[in-house]
Amino acid sequence: MNVLVFDHQDDLTIDTKAVKPIVEKVLALEKVSSDEVSVYFVSTEEICRLHKEFFDDPSPTDCISFPMDLKEDKADHHILGEVFVCPKTAIDYVGAPGGEVYHETTLYLVHGLLHLMGYDDIDDAEEMRAAEKTHLKNLIQSGSLLINS
């Protein structure tokens, strides 16, 4: 699977090589296959712009997901979608840069990936939170959290 990773922010140092194993582990546990997923780490300004443009809400948020190919699509090359993650939101939530920020940023990535796979945190919040816990536990056990490069 091709995992495209773009780091367009300066708030938190991201080891971009750590992203692909996270994506692969989450999709494997969900039994979802894809040829391509894109992950963007973006600034507060960019996440606010996207949030305003697509959700008519200019406030910062943790992540935004854009699913691409539907399960019913029979394309030769299946693109699951794009996830935009804002590490600064994690810094603001946790209070200071450090290990907990990387844990929180990993949670945002998992959250975004779950959205790409159809999870809904409005109508099925409990199911989504349970999936997040399962995935984070799996990632922690395998040593696959985002870390400072």
Image (cartoon, grey):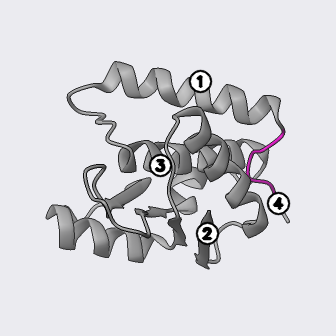
Question: Are the residues tagged 1 and 4 within 8 Å (C-beta)?
Answer: no
Q: Which mark is residue 134?
A: 1
Determine which residue is flagged by label 4.
Answer: 148
In the image shown, does 53 or 82 lie closer to the viewer?
82
Which numbered disc, 3 or 2, marks the residue closer to the eye?
2
Badge 3 marks a residue whose secondary structure is: helix
Specify few, some or many for label 4: CA neighbours under 10 Å numbering under 14, 14-19, or 20 or more: few
Q: Position of residue 1 (x, y in %)?
A: 62, 62
| Direction from residue 124 to residue 83 in the image, left or right | right
Determine which residue is flagged by label 3.
Answer: 113
Quadrant housing residue 28? top right
Check disc 2 and give the amino acid type.
Answer: Asn
In the image shown, does 53 or 79 lie closer to the viewer?
79
Determine which residue is flagged by label 2.
Answer: 2
Residue 147 highlighted magenta (yes or no): yes
Question: Are the residues tagged 1 and 3 within 8 Å (C-beta)?
Answer: no
Badge 1 marks a residue whose secondary structure is: helix
Mark nearer the N terminus (3 vs 2)? 2
Q: Chief secondary structure of the magenta span?
A: loop
Q: Residue at image x 61%, y 52%?
A: 23
Check disc 4 and give the amino acid type.
Answer: Asn
Q: Residue at image x 31%, y 60%?
A: 74
In the image shown, does 128 or 8 lie closer to the viewer?
128
Q: Which residues are magenta?
A: 143-148
Badge 2 marks a residue whose secondary structure is: strand
Q: Residue furthest left?
A: 56
Check disc 1 and give the amino acid type.
Answer: Thr
Q: Position of residue 5 (x, y in %)?
A: 61, 72
Disc 2 to disc 1, C-alpha distance: 24 Å
